[in-house]
Image: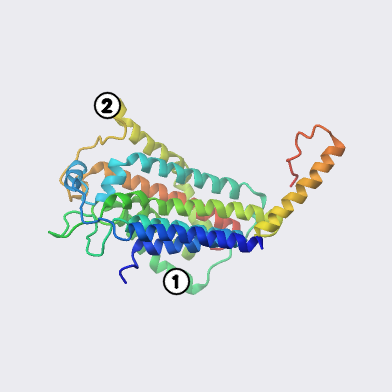
């Protein structure tokens, strides 16, 4: 009985929400293009308007999204790696078919992630998407080579220190304009020709930093889960 | 098929996700339903200012064709990564609960917690009347 009441309530609420939206928003007035698109491009030097918004005009939102991601990664590592049973799982090797095909795929995936990150202000892509694609490439790399080898190599490269340093660097970039008497989150680097790779250096720099941050954070989460489970 | 627009599909997904979120008792299925709700939010925001004839908001667009409003796109872009991080964090919490109560059924877990607290409360009442750490459960 209780279950049925809850079901009815859920369906009714959802249908009410759907009804409201279907009747009110099914024909939005989308004919008007954004009038200030050209202004935004000339100010930031990034033809991709989405990049220009989330890494320049609305950098404040992006800053806190990066911090939310950092906190979530810290939480996963804290709860998963501090437990006694986490180190017990012995790694199980992948099958040969998977190893061989992952070996072919992982350089391409890593390269695609790099491309999406670096050209994020010119074409579809950006730091967030590129970082996730590169993290999938790293996962394929783990499948073909083995978890502990990759972990040792990345730790040798100081990936954990980088993980803590990157959010601080991003926050420093956001606060740095205050030192030069400019408002916070304003663009310090020169704006070049729109459509060129180095046409908007600040968005390029932030894209690369965000991509690295997402890549390292995703790797930390994946490593914690792989360690717990023993296989991917 | 004019009625089958992005917002409509998003609302149908929202209805399915909300219903599953409330009705199903398995915590993992609840997380899947939460993912569905999240996707419906993303689909709603990116399709609310878009029509099929529009170009992607990357200049220079084709002359004469309108471009989609980039603002909602920018708002939901990082939601995908945040989605992944939050899903990982909640899965870790589910794993902790499963390790302790050996079930993903939220009704059973609630029942186990209640009985645990009841027994602990009575023990503490008998042993020490202050009961400062009545909530502290030994592992």
Task: Give the camera-side residue of A35 and A41.
Answer: A35
Task: Give the camera-side residue of A145 and B92.
Answer: B92
Query: Where is the N terminus of chain A found, in terms of image quarters?
Result: bottom right
What element does badge 2 sit on? Answer: helix
Residue at left 35%, top 57%? A24
Mark number displayed over residue A70: none
Q: Residues within 10 Å of mark 1 (few under 14, many from 20)?
A: some
Q: Are marks 1 and 2 in contact (CB under 8 Å)?
A: no
Q: Quadrant of residue A56?
A: top left
Query: Do we see residue B28 in this rendering?
Result: no
Name the outermost residue toward the left. Answer: B63
Residue at left 35%, top 45%? A209
Residue at numbered disc 2: A180
Q: Quadrant of residue A177?
A: top left
Residue at left 62%, top 55%? B95
Query: Do we see residue A14 in this rendering?
Result: yes
Q: Position of residue A50 (x, y in %)?
A: 28, 50
Which is in the foreground here, disc 1 or disc 2? Answer: 2
Residue at numbered disc 1: A100
Asked if residue A208 lies left or right of residue A97, the reply is left
Q: Residues within 10 Å of mark 2 (few under 14, many from 20)?
A: few
- Relative to residue B15, is residue B97 depicted above or below? above
Q: Position of residue A150 (x, y in %)?
A: 48, 56
- Relative to residue B116, is residue B55 depicted above or below? below
* Host chain of mark 2: A
């Amino acid at each position: 009985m209780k279950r049925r009441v809850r079901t009815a309530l859920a369906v009714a609420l959802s249908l009410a929400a759907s009804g409201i939206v279907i009747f009110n928003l099914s024909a939005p007035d989308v004919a008007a293009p954004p009038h200030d698109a050209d202004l935004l491009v000339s100010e930031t030097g990034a033809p991709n308007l989405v990049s220009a918004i989330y890494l320049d005009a609305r950098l404040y939102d992006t800053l806190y999204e990066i911090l939310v991601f950092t906190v979530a990664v810290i939480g996963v590592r804290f709860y998963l790696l501090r437990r006694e049973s986490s180190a017990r799982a012995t790694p199980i090797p992948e099958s040969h078919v998977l190893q061989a095909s992952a070996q072919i795929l992982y350089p391409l995936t890593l390269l695609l992630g790099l491309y999406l990150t670096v050209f994020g202000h010119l074409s579809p892509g950006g730091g967030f998407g590129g970082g996730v694609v590169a993290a999938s490439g790293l996962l394929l790399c783990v499948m073909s080579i083995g978890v502990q080898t990759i972990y040792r190599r990345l730790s040798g490269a100081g990936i954990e220190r980088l993980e803590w340093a990157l959010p601080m660097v991003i926050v420093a970039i956001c606060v740095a304009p205050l030192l030069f008497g400019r408002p916070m989150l304003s663009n310090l680097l020169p704006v070049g020709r729109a459509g060129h790779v180095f046409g908007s250096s600040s968005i390029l720099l932030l894209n690369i930093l965000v991509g690295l941050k997402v890549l390292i954070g995703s790797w930390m989460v994946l490593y914690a889960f792989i360690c717990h489970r023993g296989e991917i | 098929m004019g009625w089958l627009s992005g917002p409509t599909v998003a609302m149908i997904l929202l209805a399915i996700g909300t219903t599953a979120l409330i009705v199903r008792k398995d915590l993992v299925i609840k997380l899947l339903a939460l993912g569905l709700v999240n996707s419906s939010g993303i689909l709603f925001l990116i399709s609310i200012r878009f029509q099929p004839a529009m170009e992607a908001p990357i200049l220079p667009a084709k002359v004469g064709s309108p471009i989609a409003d980039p603002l909602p796109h920018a708002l939901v872009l990082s939601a995908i990564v945040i989605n992944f991080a939050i899903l990982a964090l909640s899965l870790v919490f589910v794993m902790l609960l499963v390790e302790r109560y050996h079930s993903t059924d939220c009704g059973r877990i609630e029942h186990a917690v209640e009985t645990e607290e009841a027994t602990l409360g009575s023990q503490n009442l008998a042993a020490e009347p202050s009961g400062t750490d009545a909530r502290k459960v030994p592992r």
